[in-house]
Image (cartoon, grey):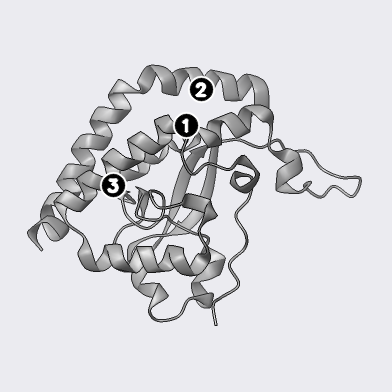
Amino acid sequence: MLYRKYFKRIFDFVLALIALIILSPLFLVVVVMVRVKLGRPVIFKQKRPGKDEKIFTLYKFRTMTDEKDENGELLPDNMRLSRFGKILRATSIDELPELINVIKGDMSLVGPRPLLVEYLDKYSDEQLRRHDVKPGITGMAQINGRNSLSWESKFNYDIWYVDNLSFLLDVKILLLTIVKVFGKNDIDQSKEITMEKFNGLN
């Protein structure tokens, strides 16, 4: 309880700050490459619901172009995702700017992934419990299948985490995330392009 209420925020802030400092050379290189290959803006921003459903702005590196059809409408995501963007997603480098969200206090290093605002009115009361904690850069779903999981499984992992949150669990999830990122486990690029839309569960 003390960790959840007090120490988790300190843990998040210190580790995120250290990570941002250590990874700053990589961060700057990616900024330049995104600018050259995809143009502006370099940072993709999107509103997401956080703890207690409070809306915040999520930061990621841009991975898609702004290509449009003859009617001026954006092309489907899979057509706008560049080869370079696929590499950023497959290595999770596109999520580095979320460390800024952690430092700001919008997010935690570990927690349920922040989903789209449009999903809020589609959750059951049980599914809404995922917002009892701050969303995370990584979480139980990410170390247990990532986008290969069904929505039901993802929510089950999210709720389990909310009920079992602890310092040791967070450390375990962070370590397993590092192993999976470097091992490229659970990464299917065909599924990394876009996640299937959530339309509610019966």
Name the disc covering residue 30, or none. 2
Q: Are marks 1 and 2 in contact (CB under 8 Å)?
A: yes
Task: Give SS at disc 2.
Answer: helix
Query: Which quarter of the figure has residue 128?
Result: bottom left
Give me the residue at 49% from left, 39% from top: 60
- Observer-nearest residue: 116 or 47? 116
Observer-side mark, 3 or 2, equals 3
Q: Label 1, label 2: how many angstroms apart (C-alpha)?
A: 8 Å
Task: Give SS at disc 1.
Answer: helix
Bin the neighbour count of mark 1 within 10 Å (Cα to Cα): few under 14, some 14-19, many 20 and up: some
Q: Give residue 59's position: percent from left, percent from top.
A: 46, 42
Q: Label 3, label 2: how many angstroms apart (C-alpha)?
A: 26 Å
Observer-side mark, 1 or 3, equals 3
| Quadrant for the N terminus in the image | bottom left
For marks 1 and 2 on the same chain, the one whose residue lies earlier in the sequence: 2
Name the disc covering residue 182, or none. none
Give me the residue at 50% from left, 35% from top: 94
Q: Give residue 195's position: percent from left, percent from top.
A: 60, 54
Task: Give SS at disc 3.
Answer: helix
User: Pointer 1: what residue?
Assistant: 93
For marks 3 and 2 on the same chain, the one whose residue lies earlier in the sequence: 2
- Observer-nearest residue: 54 or 153? 153
Q: Residue furthest left?
A: 2
At label 2, the amino acid type is Val
Name the disc covering residue 173, or none. 3
